[in-house]
Image (tube, grey):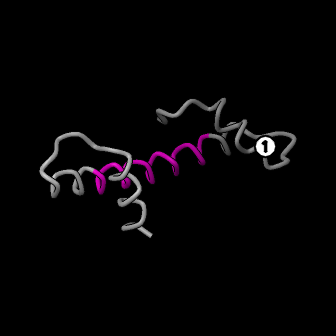
Amino acid sequence: MSEIPKAPIARIIKDTGAERVSEDAKAELAEYLEEVARDVAIEANNVAKIAKRKTIKPEDIKLAIKNLE
């Protein structure tokens, strides 16, 4: 079960020009985005720990994304 609400997912897809979006498509994209977000969060947490911080900062997220590319 996805934690990301389906309405924003549908808006993102519709912003690309799609007229309709199936429930399964919304669920599939939400699941993928959560997986990517989880990976970024794990890496950002590692970056913060290396910097001897408990708080994840925006620059940690940016570096985590770069590291995962």
Residue 47 is inside the magenta segment = no
The reply to whether the magenta stretch includes residue 39 is: yes
The part of the image, by quadrant, that contains residue 12 is top right
Per the rendered image, the range of residues in magenta is 27-44
Which residue is located at x 45 percent, y 70 percent?
A: 69
Which residue is at 69% across, 36% downward?
23
- Name the kind of residue labelled 1 in the image: Asp
Q: Between residues 31 and 53, which one lies in front from this camera angle?
A: 53
**Residue 2, position as x, y percentages in the image:** 49, 36
The answer to which of 58 and 22 lies nearer the viewer is 58
Please name the residue shown 36% across and 52% down the image.
59
Residue furthest out toward the left: 52
Horizontal side of residue 53 vs 23, given as left or right: left
- Residue 6 appears at what percent x and percent y? 62, 32
Q: What residue do we see at 36% from left, 55% from top? A: 39
Q: Secondary structure at mark 1?
A: loop
Residue 64 percent across, percent down from the top left? 36, 59
- Using residue 50 as the reference point, say whether residue 41 is left or right of it: right
Q: Main SS of the magenta segment?
A: helix
Report which residue position mark 1 lands on: 15
Residue 53 percent across, percent down from the top left = 16, 45
Specify few, some or many for label 1: CA neighbours under 10 Å numbering under 14, 14-19, or 20 or more.
few
